[in-house]
Amino acid sequence: MLGFLKHPVVVTADINLNVVALTAMGLLSRLWQLSYPRAVVFDEVYYGQYISFYMKRIFFLDGSGPPFGHMLLALGGYLGGFDGNFLWNRIGAEYSSNVPVWSLRLLPALTGALSVPMAYQILSELGFSHCAAMGAALLMLIENALITQSRLMLLESVLIFFNLLAVLSYLKFSNSQKQRPFSPSWWFWLTLTGVACSCAVGVKYVGVFTYLLVLAVAGVHAWHLIGDRSLSNVSVLCHLLARAAALLVVPAAMYLLFFYVHLSLVYRSGPHDQIMSSAFQASLEGGLARITQGQPLEVAYGSQVTLKNVFGKPVPCWLHSHQSTYPMIYENGRGSSHQQQVTCYPFKDVNNWWIVKDPGRHQLVVSNPPRPVRHGDVVQLVHGMTTRFLNTHDVAAPLSPHSQEVSCYVDYNVSMPSQNLWRLDIVNRDSDAGVWKTILSEVRLVHVNTSAVLKLSGAHLPDWGFRQLEVVGEKLSRGYHESTVWNVEEHRYGKSQEQEEREVELHSPTQMDVHRNLSFLARFLELQWRMLTAKSDGSEHKYSSSPLDWVTLDTSIAYWLHPRTSAQIHLLGNVVIWASASLATAVYTLLFFWYLLRRRRKICDLPEDSWLRWVLAGALCAGGWAVNYVPFFLMEKTLFLYHYLPALTFQILLLPVVLQHISDHLCRTQLLRSLFSALLVAWYSCACHVFNTLRPLTYGDKSLSPSELKALRWKDSWDILIRKY
Amino acid sequence: MLCATSRLLAARTATALPAQPRGRGPGARCRRRELHFPGHPELDLDDFLTGRLARPSVPVGRRAILRRGRMPPAVGGGPARSELRPRRGRCGPQTARVVGPDETAKPAARSRKRPGWGSRHFEAAGRWALLALVTLLSFATRFHRLDEPPHVCWDETHFGKMGSYYINRTFFFDVHPPLGKMLIGLAGYLSGYDGTFLFQKPGDKYEHHNYMGMRGFCAFLGSLLVPFAYLIVLELSNSLPAALLTAALLTFDTGCLTLSQYILLDPILMFFIMAAMLSMVKHNSCANRPFSAPWWFWLSLTGINLAGALGVKFVGLFIILQVGWNTISDLWHLFGDLSLSVVTVGKHLTARILCLIVLPLTLYTATYAVHFMVLNKSGPGDGFFSSAFQARLSGNNLHNASIPEHLAYGSVITVKNLRMAIGYLHSHRHLYPEGIGARQQQVTTYLHKDYNNLWIIKKHNTNADPLDPSLPVEFVRHGDIIRLEHKETSRNLHSHYHEAPLTRKHYQVTGYGINGTGDSNDFWRIEVVNRKFGNRIKVLRSRIRLIHLVTGCVLGSSGKVLPKWGWEQLEVTCTPYLKETLNSIWNVEDHINPKLPNISLDVLQPSFPEVLLESHMVMIRGNNGLKPKDNEFTSKPWHWPVNYQGLRFSGINDTDFRVYLLGNPVVWWLNLLSIALYLLLGSIIAVAVQRGAHLPAEVEGLSQVLLRGGGQLLLGWILHYFPFFLMGRILYFHHYFPAMLFSSMLTGILWDTLLRLWAWSLASSSLARGLYVVGNLSLLLGTAYSFYLFHPLAYGMVGPLAQDPRSPMAGLRWLESWDF
């Protein structure tokens, strides 16, 4: 009590000026002239449009990564007061005055700058000397590629930041494990590890590799913990539960949270709606929701419906028919039934309307009260505009000869009877008496006579079919496939008895009003699934490269060229750092295996604690490099040099580790050690020189003459742009 | 933890030596132990049972009386034994000896023979009889109704056809390595099949053709899988019931049965996989006698089988990984053994390299040598290979041809794209239609030989006829600037800044000019990619690129099919991306120049290593080309272990003879359950050991078997299953079967261990014994009964489909997705 009266209030600040200085230098290098160039640089054209979507609250789908990264970029736009009005259409376009370039680029730049002091911290936490830690940070500072990538609206620097944060906080956590488990700081670092991991995954999917690495290291540590007999069973259990909660549950929850925020931010319909299911579209404001609002929920006999294919590949489309018939003879000489074509049409059209008819009755209107159609019922589908019945028969389909042709039946009197009965199979029914519901029900139409299933084959018909998509009856339906599943999108109860009246009715828009909403989880699952399966068009790109080119820096990317001068931004790494980092990785691997083999023969070159430090540093740094690099060999998407940067960061961290090890353990005499230090200084000045030489291409602030540019083209494969005057 | 290392296995086999089964008469047992391993007491489950049940009060001598009943021979886990001694001194050799007689009779009882008490010979005979029984049953099930259906089933249409190609010596192309098909061809040849059947499509009747030889060969190899699995499990667990259960699971699995009965690569592949696994396990058990004859025998046999597995299909790589992992951990333990000198370890390493790397590689290469030697006639596979390769095949127009060797100005040539199935550079008197670039003459690639493929190579700056005899011959060199004139239409190969018809990012390529006079957009720089032949351009062998001088783009073919206006030939573009892809690399095939001497093409024939490399490239590309289409039903890897969907081998309608490849659901779901149980049990034991819990010795013995033997098998399952998730190519259900073999063996070991553990945990010995016997019997009988239910799937059925309630299979359609 009142102790503070007896003693003076003392604040002891323990400030590592090195860290402060590194932070300042990092900020300087990343933030200097941040809003220059005031033009769209390279992939800003790509991320920018998503920022605009966020600003306008329009739904979009980007298969390249989860939404957290995009949201962070958009946060910059929000803080800078961006209204989203900018047409992100080409690289090099000047930004209009409403685009807050500085604040949009601020966040990636900040994360890039903070990576510098974090490199210092990581090496200190790994137990290496102050010099090694400084070395790592200084290398990060002068790495041209990292600087270029941080100064633009791109996500790599954010990803690298969270990767490093995850590693750093795990190290802090595991260091406090030895002294004070379950202390507040222990909890803090443990939780931060989980949060940083989930943020890394949330920025880009490749973040998952670092997450797995941290999990693996944590797993090994936990395994040692289990083997620790000095701990009671209960405390081991507590340790394990705490780790599981922080490293598994927290990231999963965070990941869901990103999507929750994303989906609540983008609630308006937009250009990407088409990819999503009808139900999802109906949950967005505007778009389909405007049309489908208030439709009757239950499909009844006499209902007028449009049927959308659930798979929707190659394009989303609706079951369609029109007056034209299949050509009597196809190009390849096969014959057809010459009946009316049935296709799948990717646009809204009055010919997409079908009427559900009870085979036993003649009416095409809904009785009062409406009789709902249930799972297992046999129905006929009547094409609204031509009043012909959906039919399939044992005639080969135009493009998929193994399947049956689907047509609208025309009675030619040629002893080919109509086969127009379809049994309704509701795939996602609750019970066997489930009712066919608009939008929500996914149904298969099974032909009664032949058990063929109505299917979108995905092939484009030739000119006679107006390049619409082919619809077939699949006889050998082996199991469930989304291309055989349809759902009712637009729906109304038909009222018109006469054909002409009905045509007018079909043309009129549906208008009624009930609101239906999907649960968050359903929307999340669908969005996530579509994102993962969205195919990027594997188109080649002028600057795409293969992973093999990265290690040796055999490739470069021209990011931006000044419209008049030859000032340009070019993604190029600091050659000295890249080469020595790769060399260090090789040296580490060789030394590691050498020590490992010697230890196996009970020859211990290193004392136990420095061996453990050496292994942990290798597991995190060399391992971090490997997990961020090797998987790219298996990826089939278009790859660019910047995909290597996360791996490179880990490699840079490894470099001082190896150097310190050489100096401490391999340089036996003082003379050798001094010699080595001198070499290091020379080497670092060399790296600085390279940084300085490449600086005009990194910042794009200085226009070089063609001869200077030619002189910078150290490798033939570097595609430095040289203006022809 | 996953993989038993041979040293630890060695410890076990050391006690179980000399390669004799366990459970001998007391005399034999004692003698053996005294002779070889006097210090290692042998403990069995029976001992464990008694040990635990009777420990508190019953003296050692009385235990035998207590346990009059017959427990099966115990697993007992060798590795544990050496560790047991310090901890449980009282279960010494004496106990074991007392226990002996009871144990002896058990396997004999199982095989329903009653050898005299303790007779070692009878015991061994019983074991052999059991093995013979298992083998016989396997052969009986596999060869039963082998000739049905007498028509081509499923992929027989491919592999039967390829077998015929070997008999006819016709060159063909397939995505799999040649060994499997060569063996099929050989089997057909030896059994009197003449190679005349066409194998056109599934359902074709064999009629008088002799197909039984080929089917019989596959069925023979398929039947051997069961005894192999039996022996592997016996070796890993040392428990007869476990081995028997495994054998029953595989014998009575309809899937394995179906897959073994037809002319397919799978039985051959699985044979080599299992043989490799068996010889590896056998080799591991020889670890205590390194460099002895059996040690060398099993090691080299492993290598031979690895070569076989890889030679049949590339998925043989997985068993190579497994053997590799086992070898590495084995060497690691040898290396850590300080009693061995580094030289000895070096010897071990060299032996492994010789037998497991050099030997298989040699054999694998040898299969290719035979393959190319046998197939020396032109056939359907020619087009997939380069021009130089085709010159080897008799009947091909390049065979024995003679043309000038180096390209000179004035030569008339055809230019072929290096990428598979793209064809020759082609042009014809048709223009690009309105709206597609400039309305100039089309340039395409065309797969067939045609006059319109001929081009004349000219200097860019003169129009003089280079064939004028007064001019000296001038060869075309790397880096020259040339013009290519189309011979039939006299237009020049031309490109310009218009987008190509289909690939919008590339430039259009046209034929331009009149009678050879065009503009500077007709100039191309010719570059040789593989310049080891010097700066001249060699027919067939030089890989050339044509770079457009004005735009700097590279001539290539996108491989996309042009619409009707382009006669459905392939698009030719000029790509601004200077990547070295095969699409933009060409070679000169035909070459006519009257001023140059002709040489025989034979000198240009590629060497064997080049052929080997090329055929691998073509195979890999072929494999990558097997992509599933979006709107097709395809089999996903997760379908497989749950037996989600079968494969139709033959017949669709109710009047057809239908064979449906589907695993016996009882077996497969048991396997699935076992993997889950194994993981659970394994992690519990591992955590307990890590926590330093003192397991009762009997449990420890069992857990060693479970972790080491089971770990090997689990690794096998993982290696043969999970890589498929990463594969982009189209997948089929039958790809799972190698993994299924491993998972069945795991099931055998797991259930045996589980039953023993359960029996051990019960208080009463008679109850325990009863439980153990009943458990094993019910598993065996249950499997057999389920086979009785599902056997029509494999042996074929006629009649209504299973959806129809009248069908005898109606009640057996347990999953909606099965359609038999």
Image (cartoon, helix red, strand yellow):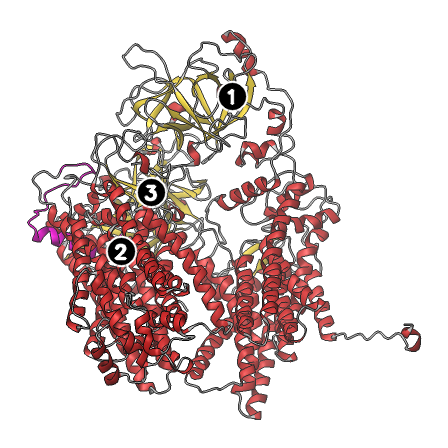
Q: Position of residue B609 (x, y in %)?
A: 23, 64
Rendered position, A83 above or below B723: above
Q: Viewed as shown, does residue B626 lie left or right of A102? A: left
Query: Which residue corresponds to mark 1?
Result: A305
Circle 2 — which element?
loop
Residue B270 in the image: x percent, y percent? 25, 56
Q: Is residue A427 above or below residue A69?
A: above
Chain at tag 3: B
Point out the residue furthest to the right here.
Answer: A5
The amino acid type of the residue labelled 1 equals Val
- Nearest to the eye among marks 3 and 2: give it: 2
Which residue lies at the image location 36% right of the left edge and 81% below the top edge? B335
Mark 3 to mark 2: distance in Å?
Answer: 47 Å
Are the residues flagged by discs 1 and 2 in contact, CB closer than 8 Å?
A: no
Mark 1: give few (<14), some (14-19) or many (20+) Cα within 10 Å: many
In 3D space, how far apart are the residues under numbered discs 1 and 3 (Cα atoms)?
Answer: 58 Å
Residue drawn at the location 44% of the way across and 10% of the way down: A361
**Which mark's residue is nearer the viewer, 1 or 3?**
1
Tag 2 subunit = B
Identify the residue under disc 2.
B313
| Number of marks in the rendered image | 3
Residue type, mark 3 in image: Asn
Q: Report the magenta residues as a range.
A: B176-205
Q: Is residue B744 visible?
A: no
Check residue B186 for magenta coloring.
yes
Q: What residue lies at 26% left-to-right and 74% top-to-bottom?
A: B100
Occupied quadrant, residue B206: top left
* Residue B492 numbered tag: 3
Mark 3 crowdedness (10 Å alpha carbons): few <14, some 14-19, many ≥20: many
**3 and 2 marks in contact (CB < 8 Å):** no
Rendered location of residue A473, percent (x, y): 36, 27
